[in-house]
Image (cartoon, rainbow, N blue to C red):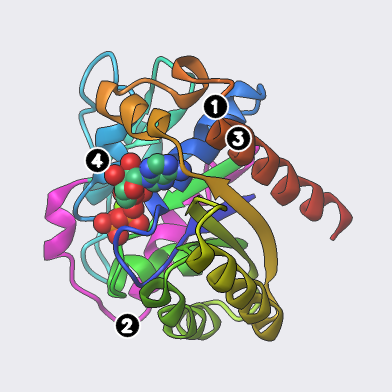
Amino acid sequence: MIVAVVHQKGGVGKSTTAAALAQAAAYAGRRVLAVDVNPQPTMTMILPPPPAPPRSTIYDVLPQTEKGTAVPITRATVTLPDAVELVTGDRRLQLIRSWPGSARRLKQALSPVAGDYDIIVIDCPPQGGEMQTAGIYAADKIIVPTTAEPAAVAELAPTMNAIRTANPAADVAIVATMVDARATITKIMLARISEAAAGYGAAFLGNVRRAAAVQEAQALRRSLYEYAPHSKPAADYLRILEAITEEKKVG
Ligand SMILES: Nc1ncnc2c1ncn2[C@@H]1O[C@H](COP(=O)(O)OP(=O)(O)OP(=O)(O)O)[C@@H](O)[C@H]1O
Ligand SMILES: [Mg+2]
């Protein structure tokens, strides 16, 4: 299963969600590949550092022109200490140009290894663009993390529009991130998020609670499941991972 983590708005918890789902999968004993397609490679920077820097990155894996060649994804894959395998991000992605059919290049790059993993998680950049489209196109499931704030909820409509345009068949699930259930604004916005999800034909997979352990683990570059396995967000992301994989079995 290939899962892309997508939201047009910045700072809503996309990279945190992608990293935590990958770490939850590794913790649960699944084979997992994390792929960072954000030109500002946050997910790469919050995951535990690889034992040695990779010779190639996501940039080298994607053909630059319609007839161009690229290095095989296996050559750009590193195994992290938490057993997550990673294709690292690269700032050169901001130079990447589109060409007719270029949204397919990520899916094509992943296809030789798709069967080797139980789950592949793609962290996409905010604000649209070529790499967001490529991530959406490559996935069979899209997770849309959103904070329970008006500015983030307002960006759900353009996000859903981008998803339906690039990949109409994808399963979409929304999760609420950084949730502090005591705040009244949160209660108001959570009701709107679950209504919006129903309106878009997307699943609402519930909340990830806010906890300082998330930022601490990221700053220390340790797996959330090693640093704070009993924290609320660790439990929430495991539950969400199970929901994603369960749905898949039923569907
Ligand atoms: N459950 C949580 N509890 C506490 N802090 C969190 C939680 N989830 C995310 N954060 C923090 O919120 C900030 C933004 O998260 P993140 O970088 O994942 O967002 P993003 O959507 O990927 O941003 P961008 O659009 O810039 O890529 C980070 O500092 C992250 O540590
Ligand atoms: Mg990010």
Q: Nearer the viewer, mark 3 or mark 1?
A: 1
Q: Position of residue 75 (x, y in %)?
A: 33, 32
Mark 2: amino acid: Pro
The quarter holding residue 54 reads top left
* Discs 2, 3 touching: Cβ within 8 Å: no
Residue 158 located left or right of residue 29 = left
Against 60, is 174 above or below? below
Residue 100 is tagged as 2
**Magenta extent:** 90-118
Q: Earlier in the sequence, mark 1 or mark 4?
A: 4
**Secondary structure under badge 1?**
loop
Against 31, is 5 above or below? below
Determine the CA span between mark 3 and mark 4: 19 Å
Q: Position of residue 251 (x, y in %)?
A: 84, 61
Residue located 73% across and 41% down the image: 242
The answer to whether the beta carbon of the residue marked 2 is less than 8 Å from any atom of ligand 1 is: no
Q: Is residue 71 visible?
A: no
Q: Nearer the viewer, mark 4 or mark 2?
A: 4
How packed is label 1: few (under 14 Cα within 10 Å), some, or many (20 or more)? some
